[in-house]
Structures are given as C-alpha cells and as structure tokens.
Image: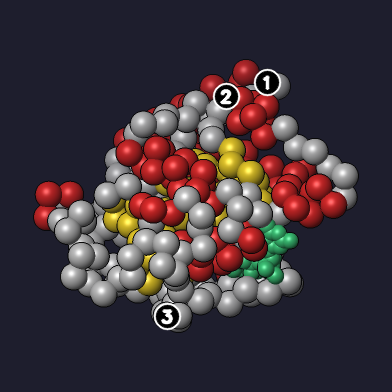
Amino acid sequence: MNQGKESRGVKDRGQDSGVPAPCETCPVHHAANLKKLGVDMADWDFVVALAGNPNTGKSTVFNALTGLRQHTGNWPGKTVTRAEGGMEYGGYGFKLVDLPGTYSLLATSLDEEIARDFILFGRPDVTVVMVDATRLERNLNLVLQVLEITNRVVVCLNLMDEAERHGLRVDHRRLARDLGVPVVPTVARYDKGLDDLLDAIHDVATGQAVGKPYHVHYDQPQVDRAVSRLEQRVQAVFPDVPNAKWVALRLLDGDERIIEAVEEGELGDLQYGEGMRVEEPATAS
Ligand SMILES: Nc1nc2c(ncn2[C@@H]2O[C@H](COP(=O)(O)OP(=O)(O)OP(=O)(O)O)[C@@H](O)[C@H]2O)c(=O)[nH]1
Ligand SMILES: [Mg+2]
C-alpha cells in the first residue's frame, strides 16, 4: 500500500503546491511543522488509521489535521464509510483514514465491518485509537483488541474537558505504562493536545517509539497453546496475512465469516482491499 520512499519527494511538496504556510490557517498551536494537504495525496510515507468507538472525535481530529470537512456532530454513527486526507508533518507525508465508529473488532454492522477490515487488513502504519475519557472502561475494549494485532498504536484520550467537568481524573501516564503504547490526552474540539498527538504519530510511524503492548492473558495455558498452534498454521497457509493471531482467535471463537474466508482461500484477498467498501470523497474546506 505504501510507496517507495525514495520516489516520494515529500519534503519538496508544499513549496509549490499552494498549501498555505504553516500557522497561517492552522489552529494547532504547535503546528510549525504541520501542512494540511486536504485531498492532495499523490505521495505519502505512512498510512494512519483513525479508529475508535462512535462519537469519540475521530472526524474532528481528521478535519483538524487534513483541513477537510468530514461530517461531525454529537451523535454516534455519523461516519459510515471511510474517508481519506493528507497531512505533512516533520518532513513526512501521512495519509489519514477516518473510519466509522466501532465498539469492537467483532463487527456487527456494515460500518463497523468497514472499520474492522481497514484496521485488520488495510496495513496502517499507525492506528490511532480515539478514546472517550469519560467512558474509559467501555472504550478500552477496542484498545485491547487492537493491541492484540499491532504494536503500532497511539491512544488518543479525547474529551478530557468533559472528563474534567464530570470530576474525572485520568492518569494518562499510568495508562500509557499499563498499555505499553503512547497515550495522548486531547480536547480535539478546541485543538488542545494535537501537537502531542502529531509527535506521537510521527514517532510510532518512524519507529522512534516502539510499543510493547499489553496482551490479555487467558487463564488456561491450553488456550494460549491452541492460539499459538493455530496462528502458526494460519501463517503457513496465508503468509501475507498481517495478523494471523487475530485470525486464530476468531477461528477458535467460531466466527463464520472468517471460517468461510479460510475455507474458500480468500483470507489473503482481504488485505488487498477486496471486499472493502469504497471510501466517500472527503470534502475540501
Ligand atoms: N467537549 C468536547 N467535544 C468534542 C471533543 N472532540 C470532539 N467533540 C465533539 O464530539 C462530537 C463527535 O465528534 P466526531 O468527530 O463527529 O466523532 P466521531 O468519532 O467521528 O463520530 P462517528 O463518526 O459517529 O464515530 C462533535 O460534536 C464534536 O464537536 C472534545 O475533546 N471535547
Ligand atoms: Mg466520524
């Protein structure tokens, strides 16, 4: 999915592309390095997925970083297909993918399926999981599932203003230690914390920060053994599938869609985007 870095010339882009100089229009207060590229994405170095429960501020962050205008509003289920936009930060080009909200990688609805397929098979370089700081317990379910399949994760602890209003204090440093990946507190609606979010995305994308994600341990060692044996067999049959462990877990759980994909030999196709819904074009501002 990514292109060869040598051919990208990312650092040159923007000088003649009509992209406004940083800070002219940029509300991100630390954004001397940020260029919002809108839909102008001929080249990119890294793909960043914006995932999370519904109504956690994914599209708000997407709009702030790309300059686009994805629909936002205070009810869940606004984003129903995926949208793409670009930004340049720290000399690298990033393609951001705004996903529909999902509570779980065990998708139940069509829009959840779109998000799940992209997280699992779209090979994002970084997955930002947006978390509602006022509903941490419910939101951590998805975080833990994503940590099962990749260590290239940034947790964006959003709606910190709402948390404060409710008298909730979240120890984000402790959470980062416990989860083993960067956790960035933000108030996306007012562009607070987005500079730190950009840094975290940059560091994970470039390998300057390497996550050591917390993995759920199963009480019975037999389960761990079964998962690991099945994982090896999935890997042997589908060497290009990026997350054999997740596939193994789903097979053990009896997930019919995954069983069918394995039986039909179609599992490998998913990563190339077959079966993924076409994204809706994001609106330029
Ligand atoms: N108070 C507060 N509101 C926020 C914050 N971030 C986003 N919002 C608001 O929360 C609502 C939902 O934001 P969206 O960006 O549409 O959320 P989403 O995650 O894309 O939602 P879905 O696409 O439905 O999954 C909007 O009204 C935003 O203005 C924040 O940090 N604090
Ligand atoms: Mg949205």
Whether residues under marks 2 and 3 lie with C-beta atoms below 8 angstroms apart, the answer is no
Whether residues under marks 2 and 1 lie with C-beta atoms below 8 angstroms apart, the answer is yes
Q: Which residue is mark 2?
A: 224
Quadrant of residue 86 within the rendered picture: bottom left
Residue at 87% from the left image edge and 50% from the top image edge:
166
Q: Nearer the viewer, residue 128 or 118?
A: 128
Marks 2 and 3: which is nearer the front?
3
Distance Cα–Cα, label 2 vs label 3:
48 Å
- Specify the amino acid type for callout 2: Asp
Circle 3: element type: loop
Circle 1: element type: loop
Q: Is residue 103 above or below residue 84?
A: above
Please report whichever mark, 3 or 1, sits nearer to the chain's N-terminal start.
Answer: 1
Circle 2: element type: helix
* Residue 168 picture location, percent across and down: 84, 42
Q: Which residue is mark 3?
A: 284
* Residue 132 picture location, percent across and down: 71, 52
Whether residues under marks 3 and 1 lie with C-beta atoms below 8 angstroms apart, the answer is no
Marks 3 and 1: which is nearer the front?
3
Report if residue 213 is visible in the image. Answer: yes
215 displayed left or right of 207: right
Q: Which residue is mark 1?
A: 220
Q: Quadrant of the N terminus?
A: bottom left
Quadrant of residue 219 within the rendered picture: top right
Residue at 53% from the left image edge and 33% from the top image edge:
181
